[in-house]
Image (cartoon, helix red, strand yellow):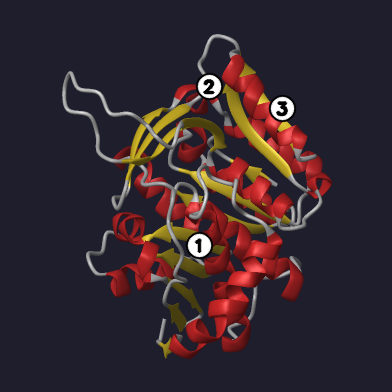
């Protein structure tokens, strides 16, 4: 079960530049509309990686507009169960994404109906489904962010493994999210988010602080520089796979989907992984491969396929494994 913010992405990728005031830039690669938001991206990617849609569920909020219908119909098209709060008076969230060649993405977000997602709705679905895994995307659903402690505590009470993913939260809820980490078995963030949430300026100290605050397994992605996985004082670093990047939008969500898909295969979802270096390395390798493959296509999920992931691992996996670094710390 995946819960949190849902967004419709409007993407102009492979742009030569951003238009000057009053100017025009032609989007030679087209302007496309895709499903977005961490829970939706994660679930669609898992379905494309072989997890039956009937085992997946998405909880979120949409408005009473065509974009809300688009979100629901797209998810159901993959067989994914939907538990959406619909508010006819609100707009479905949208993200206008500009991707200039050789530059990082530029996001322009309307939070829309996400600000109407209530924690009681998430908890009601939790109690109904009693999932083995509860994935929560925080940072853009203010009512749930404010009560994240209660939501994650209830998920743990019901026996679920908990996975927290987030975008950089505002100051008003940062401390609340920090306090909720004691109920988090696994979490993902990028380096900037790790520093912000932890309050530490260095990445090493940020990871240590997140662990001290209670997070079990910590995943930190570094874009084209690779990723870290930290669990019980074991820290594994791997460099990134090399691919032709068309659109990196949603790469972090694909990374998380890859991690959970491999965890499902190698360890099941009855308990968190053990701090076995071989296991952790394979989990990180597959997660990185899925994130890299996603970057080869426009949109958050379009390029993710099992065969493409396996081919990338076959081509570059041994090189990544040889460059893997393992450190052991006291935290």
Q: Is 127 displayed left or right of 104 in the figure?
A: right
Query: Which mark's residue is nearer the viewer, 3 or 2?
Result: 3
User: In the rendered image, which residue does mark 3 sit on?
Assistant: 73
Where residue 301 appears, as percent x and y from the top left, is: 59, 47
Where residue 140 appears, as percent x and y from the top left, is: 44, 36
* x 77%, y 57%: residue: 50
Label 1: how many residues lie within 10 Å, few (<14), some (14-19) or many (20+)?
Answer: many
Whether residue 267 appears in this view of the structure is: no
Query: Which mark's residue is nearer the viewer, 1 or 3?
Result: 1
Where 123 sits versus 49, above or below? above
First in sequence: mark 2 vs mark 1:
2
First in sequence: mark 3 vs mark 2:
3
Q: Is 261 displayed left or right of 111 in the figure?
A: right
Quarter of the image where one finds residue 25: top left
* x 40%, y 87%: residue: 329
Which numbered marker is on residue 25?
A: none
User: In the rendered image, which residue does mark 1 sit on?
Assistant: 292
**How far separated are the C-alphas under marks 1 and 3?**
27 Å
User: In the rendered image, which residue does mark 2 sit on?
Assistant: 92
């Amino acid at each position: 079960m995946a819960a949190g913010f849902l967004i419709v992405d409007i993407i102009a990728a492979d742009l030569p530049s951003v238009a000057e005031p009053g100017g025009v830039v032609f989007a030679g690669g087209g302007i496309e509309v895709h499903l977005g938001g961490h829970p939706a991206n994660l679930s669609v990617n898992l379905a494309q990686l072989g997890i039956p849609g009937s085992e997946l569920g998405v909880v979120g909020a949409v408005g009473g507009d065509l974009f809300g219908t688009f979100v629901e119909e797209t998810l159901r098209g993959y067989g994914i169960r939907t538990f959406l709060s619909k508010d006819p008076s609100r707009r479905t969230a949208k993200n206008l994404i500009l991707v200039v060649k050789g530059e990082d993405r530029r996001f322009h977000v309307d939070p829309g109906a996400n600000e109407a997602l209530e924690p009681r709705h998430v908890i009601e679905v939790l109690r109904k489904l009693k999932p083995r895994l509860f994935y929560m995307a925080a940072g853009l659903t203010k009512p749930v962010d404010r009560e994240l402690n209660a939501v994650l505590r209830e998920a743990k009470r019901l026996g679920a493994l908990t996975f927290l993913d987030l975008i950089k939260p505002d100051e008003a809820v940062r401390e609340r999210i920090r306090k909720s980490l004691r109920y988090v078995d696994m979490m993902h963030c990028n380096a900037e988010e790790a520093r912000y949430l932890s309050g530490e300026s260095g990445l090493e100290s940020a990871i240590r602080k997140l662990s001290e605050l209670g997070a079990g397994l910590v995943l930190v992605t570094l874009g084209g520089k690779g990723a870290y996985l930290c669990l019980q004082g074991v820290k594994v670093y791997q460099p990134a796979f090399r691919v032709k990047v068309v659109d990196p939008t949603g790469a972090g969500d694909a990374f998380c989907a890859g991690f959970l898909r491999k965890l499902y295969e190698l360890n099941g979802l009855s308990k968190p992984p053990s701090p076995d270096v071989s296991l952790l390395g394979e989990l990180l390798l597959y997660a990185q491969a899925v994130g890299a493959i996603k970057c080869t296509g426009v949109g958050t999920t379009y390029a993710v396929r099992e065969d493409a992931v396996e081919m990338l691992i076959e081509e570059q996996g041994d090189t990544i494994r040889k460059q893997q670094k393992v450190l052991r710390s006291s935290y």
